[in-house]
Image (spheres, rainbow, N blue to C red):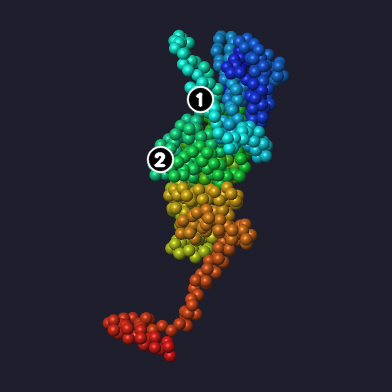
Amino acid sequence: MKLNNELHSVDRFTIHIPFPLSSYERKLITLLYQPLIGPEPISLYFLLWAEGEDEEGRDYTHYHLMNGLDMSIGAIFNARIALEAIGLLRTYKKETDDLHYFSYEILPPLEARRFFEDPLLSMFLFSKIGENAYRRLLQRFTPKRVAIEGMTEISRQFTDVYQPIQQHMPKNMMVHDIAEKPSKIPFYYQSFDFPLLMSGLSENMIPHRLITAEIKETIAKVAFMYGLSAIDMKHVLMMANSDDELTTDAVRKSASEYYKLTISKTPPAISKMLPPEQAHEQAKEWNSKQDELVQYFEQARPIDVLIAVNDGKQVFDHELEMYESLITQYDITPPVVNVLIHYISLNNPGHISKKYIQAIAADWRKKGIETATQAMNEARQFMDQKNPTVKKSTTIEDMHAEFELLQAAAYVLYQFEPGKASAAKLKNIEETFKSLMKKIEPPVLLQMLADGKEPFAHELKAVTQFASMYEWERPLLNTLIHYAHFSSEGNLNLPFLEAIASGWRKQSVQTIETAIQYGQNYRKSRAQKYSRTTYGNPEKKELPAWINSSEKPKSQAALEELERQYRMKKKS
């Protein structure tokens, strides 16, 4: 909604404080909330607090706030919505022909324990102030335990001290309509695609009874915070599940590990969304501002681009899911998807063909297009052709070609027998393998190694734990997973990964090439070790004549006679 329709300086407001606020709340707001939303929203909060505490019910115009804070009406509006989003303010509105009337309800901050338990607030505070400052704050607000070791509690119960008195309370005095302090920030978690998540979770993977309302809220919050899709969260839940038990802490920890494995080692940071009208204005100038356009595509979210090309209107769910699947299922980078959205909107206004979009995306992926600039150049070539030819897309389940490549590479590089048949019909195996290791995410590699099937939860957990502990570069980590998969005959586990990684670290293995060379040398030395026998060189060993003969002994007696002759000859 645009500002000129939302708030005017002459609009009037009243202030309501349903709970008494103390210096403890002031400390929480200053130390925990201000780093998240900045000084201007906090200044507005403290001014409303001060005015409402002494003169609750009095009405003001917004000129009063503008003068008291030396802020424009636009800045007042932005500060207000920041307070609303973080859970420190509720706003109510009534419209008349001439004016708008607002009621601002000042809310207390969350208790420190609830603040640090909330995955959104705690993680965004961590990313803002850093690990050391975060630990100090956590320690500061952790209750100090009373030294009661060796002591026995002797406190009396209520019934030990008091007894009931026969009195009747009037019914109208028994009505309790007392407001409760907020226990969480406002967050509409139903916007997460739970149907898609649940459709991908079988009862064998995660019993649906474990997905409680509390777990759902945690799922939605960590998915929002880390930018994870419903498909990503399926992997997170598989990692978090332990003996048919799913806890909020396990979901949070698994989401953090999955984020480090697939996206970034740096914690996510909070930022405000680009308003739809601003995105639309930016979209109008796309064709004339090349550099700004590239920068926008590199930084914007696909949903923002979709809103922009739709003149600021809300996006239909099927459109969003279609483009989201390009990122989550087909491994297309967000900047490339943004360019694709823009290209489709220019060439197919009012009409979207899913097959056409997937075909273009498949062609771009095959050509190795990963940046906005590359995608824009390719889009221009598409537009210059009267009949652009595109190739058939591949679904995420159809990974058989990659599966055969990985098997063939295991044979060509390390002489693992399962890949011998695949190696016979493929070319340029080593170079194609290296290229694949540099592009894909480790969870996708596990799925390719399973010929498109879902990887087992213990394998995903082992790889994720290894990645979060040792922070290897993706190409080297993928090479380690590939080698360990075939070395363990498909039974990946964390100790085995660590054992191989230890050998690599001792030999300073840091690239795909050195990892392959180390694996080849190790396999050769192992093959030589097991080829030796206690009888010396097997080629010089004398064998009985009947072993190499096509004629078998005709009786047991004949067999025993031949064996006796052989022993006698050996003794002599």
Seen as rendered, the residue at the extreme bottom is 572
User: If the image is split into quadrants, where does the N terminus sit?
Assistant: top right
Q: Residues within 10 Å of mark 2 (few under 14, many from 20)?
A: some
Looking at the picture, which amino acid does disc 2 mark?
A: Pro
Task: Measure the C-alpha gap from mark 2 to mark 1.
Answer: 42 Å
Under circle 1, the secondary element is: loop
Q: Where 125 falls versus 495 (above or below)?
A: above
User: If the image is split into quadrants, where does the C terminus sit?
Assistant: bottom left
The structure residue drawn at horizontal position 54% and vertical position 44%, both measured from the top left corner, is 258
Between 229 and 41, the one nearer to me in the picture? 41
Horizontal relation, residue 132 to residue 481: left or right: right
Under circle 2, the secondary element is: loop
Q: Where 429 falls versus 120 (above or below)?
A: below
Is residue 108 at all visible to an observer of this figure? yes
Q: What is the x, y in percent for residue 312? A: 55, 27
Between 264 and 526, the one nearer to me in the picture? 526
Residue 114, disc? none
Q: Residues within 10 Å of mark 1 (few under 14, many from 20)?
A: few
Horizontal relation, residue 113 to residue 569: left or right: right
Q: Which residue is mark 1?
A: 157
The structure residue drawn at horizontal position 60% and vertical position 22%, both measured from the top left corner, is 108
Q: Which residue is mark 2?
A: 207
Between 497 and 376, the one nearer to me in the picture? 497
Q: Earlier in the sequence, mark 2 or mark 1?
A: 1
Q: What is the x, y in percent for residue 566? A: 38, 86
Q: What is the x, y in percent for residue 420? A: 45, 64
The structure residue drawn at horizontal position 39% and vertical position 86%, both measured from the top left corner, is 567
Is residue 232 at all visible to an observer of this figure? no
